[in-house]
Amino acid sequence: MKLFKSKRSTNAHPARNRKLFGIGLIGFTLLILGGFVLRFSFVATVGEVDSNNLAKQRQKQYRTDTVLQAQRGAILDRTGNVIAEDSNTYTLYAILDKQNKDGDKPDYVTDKEKTAKVLSRYLAISEDKILARLNPTKKHVFQVEFGTPGTKLSLAIKKQIDSEKLPGIHFRETPSRLYPNGVFASHVIGIAQAQGKGGGLTGVMGLEKQFNTVLAGDNGYRRSETDAYGYRLPNAKTKQKAPVNGGTVYTTLDSGLQSYLETLMTDVQTKYEPKGLTAVLMSAKTGKILAASQRPTFDPSTGEGLGDMWRDSLVEDNYEPGSVMKIVTLASAIQSGKYHPNEYYQSGSVKLDGGTVNDWRSGGWGSIPLSKAFPLSSNVGMVKIEQEMGAGIWKSYLDRFKFGQKTGITLPGETSGHISFARPLDQATTSFGQGIEVNVMQMMQAISAVSNEGKMLKPQIVSKVVHKNGKETVYKPEVVGQPISKETAAQVIDAMRHVVNDQDGTGVAYKMPGVDLAVKTGTGQIASPKGGYLTGDSNYIFSVAGIAPASNPKYVLYVTMKQPQKMTEPAETILASIFKPMMQRALDTTADGTVAKDTNTADVPEVTNDALTTAQDTVKKAGFDVATIGTGNKVVQQLPVSGIKALRGSRVLLLTNGAITMPDLTGWSKSDVLKFVQLTGKKFKLVGDGFVVRQSIAKGTLLGDTSGTIEFKQQ
């Protein structure tokens, strides 16, 4: 009996085992290979891997899509002058890779010393610094840029550099918005800014926002197949869709009148520093807004002042209008048959509903007829007139004049206002413009009923829109009601004549020689956050509304001023410094927008692309002062732009094709400095108001990346 197996018995068939192992390995290999074959066959037949289409993946790998940017439409004034239009800024870059070619020609910087010398004439950066960028310390750099001085270049500068034919010098284009007039109805026109990764412009304020879908174009594209080096693949097809440019918005604004109004507004803002200032000039028979402005404001070209006020005060701010509201009270009383001009009342004060209403003149004027209440701006007289109408009739006329309702003007963010009418005291105070909140355009609409023979006109800021497809939408004058008759309107205008012509009228400061003028003044209280109203001589909203000529109205002008911080003159004197010259300018302006009897202004000549010496002579002969920016010998840009009327003796800025150096700004106004900032694209901290007294960057200094400070002081 064997107790143990031999080793031979344990590994009895080694050859067979090896054979079986080999067969198994081959079978496994064939199985794997078969799987690969099946997989490749499936991929080749279906063309997909993990639900990904290989053909589409290949197209993505080699496909190059280029966005064809559509132009944003323009905003124009009533005669077609540009207020806002599409533009582009350019970023300069230089290709250094010697392998880069444009056909057989080199497309890289071949002469770095020459290139640096030439570029230094156009960029605010020295020749040495440009040369240093063209000789980077790192190896194998394909291209370089030139920092801030090489960005936001104008088309004029780009063309000048292109004309030098420098190999390897290229530009990258960025969409931007051009506002050639600077501060020009800024909140009404609004601004468009780049939004999102695509860099397209979107309106974020004013007409730019209201008509964004009209102004915004539809981008196109160009699709082609290229290799890894950017060369087009053989037999590759190019697919292209052309862009559709945006439409055009025609406003009712008159550029000459608007520019003049901005000058007047700036003067008052600078001298008296009100917390708020508005002015609107409207056609009396059509409701078309010819000029509109507010302070604080901003320059859409530079963004200067934008942080101070985003709201359009003309439609977004509610306020208590004060005594200008008495125009509506008187009109309502006359129309309702409840006005008794020869009836006497005791002026000074009146008690009702647990409160007391006082006249602005302490003690009043004694016992006087109701016919004197309007020219003297007696609150007590207006309360008497409201009481004779009765709350029901008075409220019905407030509704007829559409207070508490939006006007529907084509501007975003309009408020509807509010009327406090619960108690007899509330009802009485609305008669003289307290306890009722309005916006400026609501007041313009109400006054139009008086200027337009009883027919009330909707304020109009847009005259026509041309859509992307070429279709036009024309905005015609719109009568939105007839709260009073032609006869009533004539009686109200006659009462407004007394305000300015009577010796004791509140509007004598607005009298204009040779002008048949109808006026109503106002002094509205300002509600206090703590309740009640603010006190103090300047804590009011002062206002004036005027119609001229009173016998055949052409224009309505309404100016308001809130809380002047430097009230060195009576409120009526301050407001008259805007009202009188503005109304006179309107009366002197003909239907085609030219000024018939103006000798203080002149047309800014076109000198862009002229030789510097020729341009300087042309500007001086036109009656303007000249300021030259840059060291070049040719003008590439100017402000104001040609065709704009400007005051004789005012400054015209000429940007040349040379390197930008710092001029001596001493004595420059803030508006001129803002033009300088707009032209150069440089950043400065502006301190104070008035005229330049100090600049941190010395005259003649090359303007590079650093920003400076410019200080202003009243003179």
Image (tube, rainbow, N blue to C red):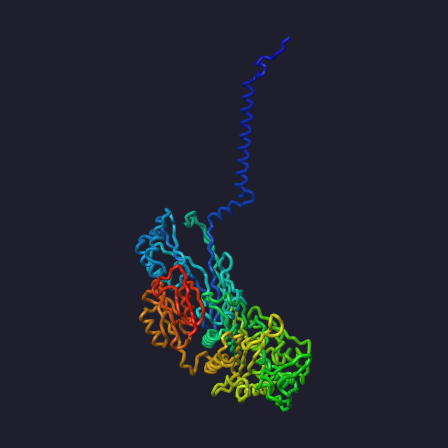
> In this orientation, which residue lies closer to the viewer: 665 or 566?
566
What x and y, as percent, mark residue 299?
46, 68
| Residue that lies at the very extreme toward the bottom in this rendered image | 342
Which quadrant is home to the C terminus? bottom left
Locate the N terminus by quadrant: top right
Q: Which of 534 and 122 is in front in this view?
A: 534
Residue 178 in picture, x, y percent from top left: 45, 66
On screen, residue 119 versus residue 479, left or right, reads: left
629 and 668: which is toward the camera: 668
Circle count: 0
Q: Of 182 and 158, which appears nearest the observer?
A: 182
Q: In which quarter of the image is residue 527?
A: bottom right
Whether residue 252 can be seen here: no
Q: Is residue 177 above or below residue 339?
A: above
Q: In this view, does 425 lie to the left or right of 61?
A: right
The percent coordinates of residue 690 (x first, y second) are 43, 72
**Left or right of residue 232, residue 294 in this image:** right
